[in-house]
Amino acid sequence: MAKINISELDPKRTVVVATGNAHKVVEIEAILSPAMPGVRFVALGELGDYPDPVEDGSTFADNALIKARAAQAETGLSMAVADDSGLVVDALDGAPGIFSARWAGEHGNDAANNEKLMREMAEVPGDRRTARFHSSVVLVRGDEVLCGDGDCEGTVGREPRGEHGFGYDPLFLPSETPGRTMAELTLDEKNQISHRFHALEDLARKL
């Protein structure tokens, strides 16, 4: 990822996105920029190498705020946006929830997390396999905090399918795309129904 000199940015017209993922910045900018004309969105990873903050909140919104505040403090820019998301399974009382990325013990081990999900859900009948991906997106402007929330409803499959996406996508069947897992959707198809898309739209309405 190309580096940007912070000193060249207008601090009043720049939003730092707490991510190293350029695609996420494009998605966020596309939805929020109409409500924030003239503002530039840049990825935190473009501004330098910063340590990840400890995400010890009790909700998705808490952890998104932790990341946004950290990006704000590390860069000195007044505006920052961050998101936190995960899978919420009804039959597992909401697990893995905020622990989605590290549910099996190692952060970001998608294969282990999916294997654990299949084990936990092995005896759960079809009508009780409901779940949703949830996203909370937080924007901080100085001391002001705005939050948008969004869900993508669906069910947990019995075996992984699909080559796209990441995390629990191969096991999650969105209600809006019957018979297809999230990992079987193109990026454009996924973005149109994703929990982050809905959360960003919710946030945009509050700007």
Image (cartoon, grey):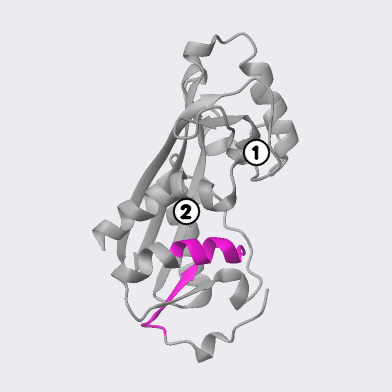
| Image vertical order of residue 134 relative to residue 15, above or below | above
**Left or right: 3 as drawn, with respect to 156:** right
The x, y position of residue 128, in whole percent, is 48, 13
Instruction: Determine if residue 142 is in view.
Output: no
Q: Which mark lies nearer to you, 1 or 2? A: 2
The x, y position of residue 6, in whole percent, is 54, 85
Q: Magenta span has 169?
A: no
Tell me which residue sits at (48%, 87%) in the image.
Answer: 9
| Image vertical order of residue 81 relative to residue 102, above or below | below
User: For residue 135, which quarter of the picture?
Assistant: top left
Q: Nearer the viewer, residue 78 or 43?
A: 43
Tell me which residue sits at (56%, 27%) in the image.
Answer: 179
Tell me which residue sits at (39%, 75%) in the image.
Answer: 78
The x, y position of residue 115, in whole percent, is 72, 26
- The amino acid beneath tag 1 is Arg
Query: Which class describes the residues within 10 Å of circle 2: few (<14), some (14-19), or many (20+)?
Result: many
Mark carried by residue 83: 2
Tell me which residue sits at (48%, 26%) in the image.
Answer: 131
Q: CA distance from mark 1 to mark 2?
A: 17 Å
**Left or right: 151 as drawn, with respect to 92:** left
Which region is colored magenta?
A: 11-28
Quadrant where the C terminus sits is bottom left
Mark carried by residue 102: 1
Helix, strand or loop at mark 1: helix
CB under 8 Å between callouts 1 and 2? no
| Image vertical order of residue 12 relative to residue 8, above or below | above
